[in-house]
Amino acid sequence: MSRRIAVVASSDANWAWQSLFVLTRSIAFDTGQEIDHHLYLSGSPDPRILAAIPGEIRCHRIAALPDYFAQGAQAHVPAAAMLRLLALEELAPAYERVIYIDGDVFQSWGSLADLARVRLNGAVLGAVRDAMFWTGASRPFFERYANALSSGIGQRYFNSGVLVADGAAYARAQISRRGCDFLRDTPQRCRFGDQSALNAVVAGSWAELSAGWNWQLSDLVYGLTDGRRPRLIHFTGPLKPWRDGLRLLPPAAFEAMRVFLGTRGWLDLLGESSPLGFDPRRDERMRTRRLEPFLRDTFARRETVKAYLDREDFADLQSGISGWG
């Protein structure tokens, strides 16, 4: 492994197959073979998963997580998600660009090598603004929260599900080390774990990518997904493709996961709440009722985010690269 671009995912045993899926999908789209792939893994995953990690992926086994990682965990965000700090710290000195991607992000199309070609213009990393600020409307509570992390952030607060780091600049600024210190020393300020810590130390000085690189799916933008064709769909929140028993989410992600698991004989890794348990006779009425809030007033919702989505000053667009299909 000696390429200039790295893509990395991190996981504990509970999300091991999801992170492996993310990386194998990146490999499949990397037709130019420009990317090294890394998996940071803690805990004791199913032995079948460990045995199936291909040679194109370097697996870094982490014996134990720091205790303070658990302080930043949430019900749908495991402590191991904060392994991204360790992964970025270790990989940044070795690569021109390091791309981190969460295990609940679905790569719809295109190579992640394109993201590595975005000009960051001196910033240590590029990211997508958190979806709570996409409308541009005043969000006093969250803006106060962001400003408490670092004065003046305001709405320049990114979601850490997809990050592209300038390796040398990131390492030189010791972003991960400072983020770990912030997470350990001020856990009460890290409402969103290491995402909060990273925003605190970067302090608003990051290159903003268009939302197609981290399409944070919610009822606000659900109806816009097919028309926009984002490269990377991020299933934020507790509803994930593999837990989507009522089949509320766009089906492409789970279908790709089903094929990934099925060809390896791993469908048993899915729980009872997976879409495989959907029975139209029993569940369709409930599905229709639950979908209604997602599909209501799509045009009106589009208008609330149109100014943000249509901006032309994003770093990727300025580099001649688009996050949209």
Image: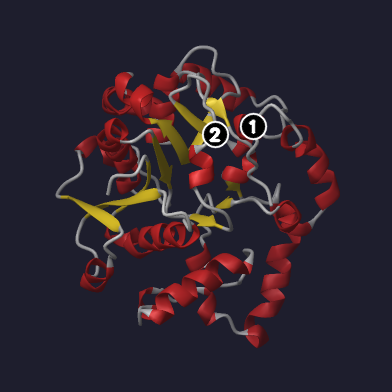
Where residue 38 appears, as percent x and y from the top left, is 31, 50
Residue 283 sits above or below residue 160 on the image: below
User: Which marked residue is nearer to the observer: mark 2 or mark 1?
Assistant: 2
Position of residue 203 relative to residue 26, above or below, is above
Q: Residue furthest left?
A: 63
**Real-space Cα separation, disc 2 to disc 1, in angstroms:** 23 Å
Secondary structure, mark 2, is loop
Q: Where is residue 132, by image quadrant? A: top right
Residue 118 — which label? Answer: 2
Q: Secondary structure at mark 1?
A: helix
Who's the residue at 54% across and 44% down the image?
114
Residue found at x 45% / y 26%: 199
Q: By what rule are the colours in the image chosen?
A: secondary structure
* First in residue order: circle 2 vs circle 1: 2
Question: Is the residue marked by circle 1 packed among few (<14), some (14-19), or many (20+) residues within 10 Å?
Answer: some
Q: Which residue is mark 1?
A: 133
